[in-house]
Image: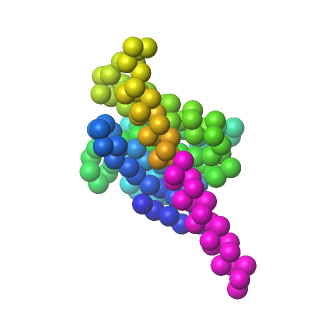
Amino acid sequence: MVLTEKGILKDFEIVVYPVPIVVVIGDMAEEVNRMYNPLDEGDTSIDKPMGDCGATTYHVESKEHKQYCLLVWFPSLNECKGSFLCHESGHMALEIFRYIGAKMNYEDQEPFCYLLGTVFRLINGTFYEYKEFLEKKTTKKKKK
């Protein structure tokens, strides 16, 4: 994990699925590119989402472990709205299902819903961890 005033980068293993996920919030381009290689076609680096894009999910490879991962990047805390968290959780869950060759269907919804909830919980928890870190920093600065 990397946690500074400019952002947070945190990786997770999902116990029953073989695809680690990485949650990034803030201005962490240097850290992201130091730790991960882009796997999306045509990309030579992993760029912070810009413009009206609330967040982006990337296919990456961990440089340390040489392992496929999914990385979701929220450019700032302001972009960590519930709708964006749900949206990107959906992308990540669908990409994990594609990776393992699983199919979604109406008769067997539980595996997908479990994964979707797990991914959302990890992203949301990272948001609150970063938010609390910044609030503590602000409180300490005000006391000085």
Q: For the view shown, which residue lies furthest in the right direction?
A: 142
Query: Relative to 137, is 121 on the left or the right?
Result: left
Asked whether 81 or 35 is in front, the reply is 81
For residue 7, above or below residue 14: below
Whole-percent x and y of residue 129? 54, 59
Whole-percent x and y of residue 52? 69, 38
Whole-percent x and y of residue 13? 34, 47
Magenta region, main secondary structure = helix
At a point 40% along the width and 44% down the height, the residue shown is 21
Whole-percent x and y of residue 23? 48, 48
- Residue 128: in magenta span: yes
For residue 119, above or below residue 8: above
The image quadrant of residue 16 is top left
At a point 37% along the width and 27% down the height, the residue shown is 111
At a point 65% along the width and 78% down the height, the residue shown is 140
Query: Relative to 24, is 140 on the left or the right?
Result: right
Asked whether 44 or 89 is in front, the reply is 89
Asked whether 132 or 79 is in front, the reply is 132
The image quadrant of residue 44 is top left
- Residue 112: in magenta span: no
Asked whether 84 or 114 is in front, the reply is 114
Give the extent of the magenta segment.
124-144
For residue 132, above or below residue 75: below
Q: How is the image coloured?
A: rainbow
Query: Relative to 74, is 64 on the left or the right?
Result: left
Q: For the view shown, which residue lies furthest in the bottom direction?
A: 144
